[in-house]
């Protein structure tokens, strides 16, 4: 044997040292029992896959529905008279309409602006000698804007509004009236100032919205016809505005509010996001999130139990090794950190696998789509709502990152559960166990 | 009198886990001087391993005091004891106890990593000591790929690479054959005689006792005979 050279080292606290070694040891330790590692990572991956896929399907279905419904009906936000939402009277109008619509049109976040007049009247057909009439909601719309974005599609044999003197009616209301495309329709109601509101239009098309109340009650006429009949002067009951994204309607409303306040009579006009105008629709999102949260919570708890079990086994299996590490001077905090790194590695493997699998599955399903025709009742509803004929998921990036973070945190927690055993391990007993 | 590396006074250890308390050590007075190689011997249950563990700060006496390199272990916290072991004591175990996921050279480096030695310096020193112990060709192998003798020599390299004040070896030859035991003991003798590393072994093995400078026999938790009690070893 050659001459030995021993030299003392200058030391610093062990808890501050060997971080890189701990990370390396943690990674290698994972592969001492590969089956356990794959099972643990597989549990994490499955949870991530399930949550991301479910949220992606929800995103594709709920969010698309909300997008279409808001664009067809409420807009992403509406300008209304301050009291109109709670008390939708004819006289609660947005005044200085030209200024308001002009200000909105000039706003960079606004994609489209649609003023609407809304009143109630009796409608009848000119050809009906018996004088049958029905109560209807008469909507005055600007066809150039309203039908350029979305709104209702006409049934075969008709078309949407294009100019003044035309009417576009819900199919049930038309059936009740016995009206057909080409018939003259008479509107008789009360104007804004209490006078008679009267108009005569020619029916150019019928629509089926999928919402029976709408199909039973709505007659759309040109906004100019409505203003003239109901006595509106540069005013509307609502001004619907479309932004870029229905999901950010509150931000959109906040963004356009200053322009509206500047253009309208002080304090008379309010900007409301669609969630306040259609709270029942907003509750769909709450339900979607609640379902997602519940599933994610259940899976997180299940995964946590699996990982706790795996790490308790790990610590028990390696009692003698931990005893040796303590004996040679490795502080319990460093041993604890090594186990936490093992948890971090296994969770990163699981999250990576889960995200990759989710991306692959969501992409595959998105490419093919799930045909709604497989579900006849749903298919009919989708057709009436002008929704796509295939269910297509949209990869939920935000949810994917969130569940990844939750899983990593859950595994860190699980890996910490056996920490007291590490901390209070008696090195002598641990080493004796092995002998 | 030469410098005392270990000083035990009235060390008593009673295990009270069972219904009948077990007196593992009964008021042991004992000192180890710098450069000594003390072999604690005795039958099973004589207290030799318990004494070794108490000297190493792995166990605490019920009564009495222990100091290592002038530092009283009694008042030290677990963290301070851990730090003391890291800085001053090298351990060699019966079952080798190398870290299974690290190669031989990484095992030797590990203590220095805990001490915060820079990467290049610790690698150089680890390779150097493996080379000098004749282990240069197995540096990149993990413990599972080494023979028992090779593992134990790597364990010795790990224990002495930081030049500890004291090397404690608990039944270091228990799992080795005669030839390998002889190699190991020659290695320990080299470390002890040429580098002044103080060694305390606990063993049943007469060959280990034969290599030690100072055999100490224990029986029933007390020192039965101590060859060096009145004649401390000379300084290295």
Image (cartoon, rainbow, N blue to C red):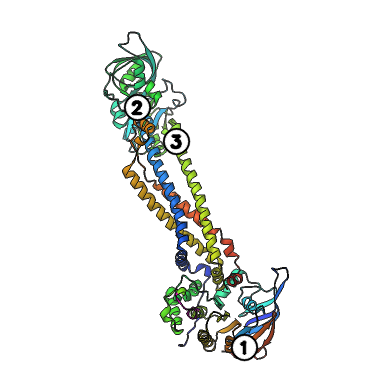
Residue A202 makes an appearance in the image: yes
Q: Are marks 1 and 3 in contact (CB under 8 Å)?
A: no
Q: Earlier in the sequence, mark 2 or mark 3?
A: 2
The chain letter under disc 2 is A
Q: Could you tell me how far apart the alpha carbons at marks 2 and 3 are, in whole angstroms?
A: 27 Å
Q: Residue A21 location, x and y as percent?
A: 46, 68
Screen quadrant of the N terminus of chain B: bottom right
Taking B91 as reference, is B2 above or below it? below
Q: Which residues are magenta?
A: B145-151
Front one among A4 and A339: A339
Screen quadrant of the C terminus of chain B: bottom right
> Badge 3 local density, few (<14 within 10 Å), some, or many (20+)?
some
> Badge 1 local density, few (<14 within 10 Å), some, or many (20+)?
many
Taking A378 as reference, is A422 above or below it? below
Magenta: main secondary structure: helix
Where on the picture, by quarter, is residue A434? bottom right
Disc 2 vs disc 1: which is toward the camera?
Answer: 1
Disc 2 vs disc 3: which is toward the camera?
Answer: 3
Front one among B81 and A435: A435
Relative to B175, A110 lies left or right: left
Q: Could you tell me how far apart the alpha carbons at marks 2 and 1 are, in whole angstroms?
A: 104 Å
Check if residue A270 falls in the magenta segment.
Answer: no
The chain letter under disc 1 is B
Q: For mark 3, give the secondary structure.
A: helix
Q: Which mark is residue B214?
A: 1
Q: Are marks 2 and 3 in contact (CB under 8 Å)?
A: no
Q: Which mark is residue A284?
A: 3
Figure label count: 3
Where on the picture, by quarter, is residue A230? top left
């Amino acid at each position: 044997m050659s001459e030995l050279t021993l030299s003392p080292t200058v030391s610093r606290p062990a808890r501050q040292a060997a971080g890189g070694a701990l990370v390396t040891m943690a990674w290698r330790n994972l592969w001492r029992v590969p089956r356990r590692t794959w099972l643990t990572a597989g549990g994490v991956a499955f949870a991530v896959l399930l949550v991301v896929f479910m949220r992606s399907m929800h995103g594709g279905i709920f969010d698309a529905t909300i997008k279409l419904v808001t664009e067809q009906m409420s807009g992403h936000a509406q300008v209304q008279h301050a009291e109109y939402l709670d008390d939708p009277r004819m006289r609660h109008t947005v005044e200085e309409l030209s200024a308001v619509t002009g200000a909105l049109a000039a706003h960079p976040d606004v994609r489209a602006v649609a003023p609407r007049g809304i009143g109630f009247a009796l409608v009848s057909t000119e050809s009906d000698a018996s004088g049958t009439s029905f109560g209807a909601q008469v909507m005055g719309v600007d066809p150039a804007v309203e039908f350029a974005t979305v709104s209702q599609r006409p049934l075969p044999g008709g078309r949407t509004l294009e100019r003044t003197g035309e009417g576009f009616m819900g199919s049930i209301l038309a059936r009740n009236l016995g009206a057909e495309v080409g018939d003259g329709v008479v509107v008789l109601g009360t104007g804004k100032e209490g006078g008679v509101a009267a108009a005569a239009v020619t029916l150019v098309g019928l629509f089926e919205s999928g919402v029976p109340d709408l199909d039973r009650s709505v007659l759309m006429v040109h906004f100019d016809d409505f203003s003239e009949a109901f006595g509106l002067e540069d005013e509307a009951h609502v001004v619907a505005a479309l932004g870029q994204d229905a999901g950010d309607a509150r931000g959109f409303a906040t963004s356009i509010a200053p322009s509206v306040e500047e253009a309208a009579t002080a304090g008379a006009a309010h900007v409301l996001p669609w969630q306040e105008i259609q709270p029942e629709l907003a509750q769909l999102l709450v339900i979607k999130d609640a379902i997602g949260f519940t599933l994610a919570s259940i899976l997180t708890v299940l995964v946590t139990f699996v990982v706790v079990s795996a790490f308790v086994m790990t610590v028990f299996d390696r009692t003698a090794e931990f005893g040796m590490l303590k004996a040679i001077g490795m502080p319990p905090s460093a041993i604890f950190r090594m186990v936490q790194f093992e948890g971090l590695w296994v969770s990163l493997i699981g999250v990576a696998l889960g995200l990759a699998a989710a991306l692959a599955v969501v992409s595959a399903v998105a490419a093919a789509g799930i045909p709604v025709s497989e579900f006849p009742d749903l298919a009919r509803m989708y057709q009436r709502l002008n929704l796509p004929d295939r269910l297509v998921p949209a990869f939920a990036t935000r949810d994917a990152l969130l569940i990844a973070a939750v899983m990593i945190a859950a595994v860190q927690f699980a890996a910490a559960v056996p920490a007291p055993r590490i901390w209070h391990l008696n090195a002598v007993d641990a080493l004796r166990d092995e002998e | 009198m030469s410098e005392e590396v270990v000083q035990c006074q009235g060390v008593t250890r009673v295990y009270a886990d069972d219904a009948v308390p077990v007196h593992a050590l009964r008021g042991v007075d004992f000192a180890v001087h710098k450069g000594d190689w003390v072999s604690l011997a005795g039958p099973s249950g004589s207290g030799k391993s318990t004494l070794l563990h108490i000297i190493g700060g792995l166990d605490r006496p019920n009564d009495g005091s222990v100091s290592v390199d002038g530092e009283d272990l009694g008042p030290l916290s677990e963290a301070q004891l851990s730090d003391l072991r890291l800085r001053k004591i090298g351990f060699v175990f019966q079952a080798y106890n190398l870290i299974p996921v690290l190669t031989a050279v990484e095992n030797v480096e590990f203590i220095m990593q805990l001490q915060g030695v820079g990467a290049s310096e610790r690698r150089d020193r680890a390779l150097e000591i493996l080379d000098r112990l004749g282990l240069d060709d197995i540096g990149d192998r993990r413990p599972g790929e080494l023979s028992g003798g090779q593992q134990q020599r790597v364990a010795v390299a790990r224990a002495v690479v930081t030049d500890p004040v004291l090397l404690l070896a608990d039944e270091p030859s228990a799992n080795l054959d005669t030839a390998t035991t002889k190699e190991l003991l020659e290695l320990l003798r080299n470390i002890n005689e040429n580098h002044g590393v103080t060694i305390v072994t606990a063993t049943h093995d007469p060959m280990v006792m034969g290599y030690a400078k100072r055999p100490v026999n224990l029986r029933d938790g007390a020192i039965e005979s101590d060859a060096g009690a009145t004649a401390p070893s000379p300084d290295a």
